[in-house]
Image: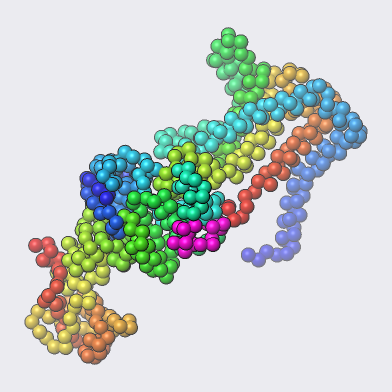
Amino acid sequence: MIALTDVKKRFGDFVAIDNVSLAVEDGSLTALLGPSGSGKSTLLRVIAGLEAPDEGTVEISGRDATRLPAQKRGIGFVFQHYAAFKHMTVRDNVAFGLKVRRRPKAEIAAKVDELLRIVGLDGYQARYPAQLSGGQRQRMALARALAVEPEVLLLDEPFGALDANVRAELRDWLRRLHDEVHVTTVLVTHDQEEAMEVADRIVVLNRGRIEQDGPPRDLYEQPANAFVMGFLGPVARLGDTLVRPHDLRILGEPRDGALEAQVARVVHLGFEVRVELELDGGEPLTAQLTRDEAAELELRGGDIVWVRRPGVGETSAETLAA
Amino acid sequence: MVVDRRARIGLRVLALAYLAALLLVPVAVVFYRTFEHGFGFVWDSITTPAAVHAFWLTLEIALIAVPLNTVLGVITAMALVRSRLRGKVVLQTIIDLPFAISPVVIGLALVLVYGRNGWFGGWFADHGIQIIFAVPGMVLATIFVCLPFVVREVEPVLREIGDEQEQAAATLGASRWQTFSRITLPAIRYGIAYGVVLSMARAIGEFGAVSVVSGKIAGETDTLTLLVENRYQNFDVAGAYAASALLALIALATLLLMLRLRPRKDQA
């Protein structure tokens, strides 16, 4: 378990982490999600021992690690830009942590081969990092971090530098790996989709503070505030209320509580149809419908419709503020 | 960019002519003049006791100054790039000082500080150590003029590789020394090698600063460059040429060494 208590970190005048307390359970995969400058990477680096907190304590597996240097924390760290040891082969990269621990050669060789098989780089032992693709380098970095059998695996935007399709593939792969290896993992990302897909718990950070913390579904369905709601998915503003575009109902005739709007554009996105509307006051509003719903309404640009938010499962900035 | 063919050829001829007039022709003349009277004469000229002494003294000074500067240069570069040191600007300026100040002035400054009547010179003299007009002073002068080379070669390389690899090594359990020796040092080794070669060339070829602090005691504090001047002043032109040729050969050897040290492409 990782336990952070009242952690504070400043860089000059900038407060990177503002009194954060957080507990990460053993074997979980937690995502620290937030925009850039929210302090998520700094928080991860504080856990790793790459940054020292100004105040507060860090506990890893029950022992106080606040003053412990990175090399003694029993962690594995994966950097956004791989941090591959360029002058070493893939084999030597992965073996590094074991070599500095002076493990027997035979053990190192066996472990390295096993890990490279797990990350799908079997046969690449003699290559140099420069001869690998970005995705392969990051898998090598992951094998390197796992080689020392860390109690905690820390990933700092690990897929941020990769192409979209490689990113999706590695995400999927990381989830499966975690189900196999079960090492306590903390992942930093600014991509809500990535966090929702991979993590079993999401911690949303903003301006150095935790906005909300919980399972992905809870955060999506019961966001604690407007920031979390906006960060976890698309939002439409209906008067003073924030709603998800797919929660909006479009009606062909006036109804109590429904607002009049004009259809500006209908965009077909396969299964989904995005309807761009303009409210009375000229405010834009986007609704998301299924293909069947849209077909039933026979929407066309210029049509006048009535928009209503659903009675159940609604979330509004107003009710949250109250 | 499209450049007129004639203009291109003209530029090349100009560049080569410039190089030839200033560098190739004089060096070639030195070699020609050296061997004008036959190889035997040259051999005799560079094997006189004074010449042999000068040769070994030159090497001795270089072999003390260059390793010292290399170790300190790497430490300084690390401090400049990796630490949150205050007063980095001041340090940067101090390192460039030997580039900015004329070697003769450096020599004079050393005499003022370490000479018999200088600030520390008296103290050293009382303890039986002579610095100025002796080998220690010449080593000091050489260290001073070679100071920037290793730092200036290593610093940009350190900046370019960044500290992520070092951080990764730390998270993998490497101690500071292990991180330095296994990650940082291999990454900056070409930078160090360039710095060493440049320092070596400068140390062997240095004239101004060493000349001032050496006192030019023939057969005692003559380095090769001082020997060349000495012989030239004494109308032993042929002897001066021979010593020059030897210096040029050493310079050429260091240059070739430098070319061989170019990093391999896949690791650059």
Specify whether residue A273 is painted magenta: no
**Image check: A313 left or right of A152?**
left
Whole-percent x, y for residue A214 in the image: 21, 60
Q: Quadrant of the C terminus of chain A?
A: bottom left
Closer-to-camera residue (B108/A305)? A305
Q: Residue furthest top?
A: B126
Q: Nearer the viewer, residue A178 or A286?
A: A178
Horizontally, residue B33 falls left or right of residue A317, namely: right
| Residue A303 position by quadrant | bottom left
Q: Is residue A264 above or below residue B130?
A: below
Instruction: Residue at 19% x, 68% y: name it.
Output: A221
Residue at image point 91% right, 34% down = B38
- B141 vs A19, left or right, is right
The percent coordinates of residue A295 (x first, y second) are: 25, 90
Q: Nearer the viewer, residue B51 or B34?
A: B51
Range drawn in magenta: A113-130
Give yes or no for residue A114 being in the magenta stretch: yes
Where is residue A216? Give x, y as percent: 24, 65
The reply to whether residue B117 is in sight is: no
Q: Residue A88 versus residue B100: which sits nearer the camera? A: A88
Occupied quadrant, residue B236: top right
Residue sitting at 28 percent across and 58 percent down?
A28
State whether residue B168 is above or below residue A118: above
Q: Position of residue B74 (x, y in %)?
A: 54, 37
* Residue plotted at (66% across, 35% down): B200
How many labels sit on residues?
0
Q: Is residue B56 in view?
A: yes
Q: Quadrant of residue A298?
A: bottom left
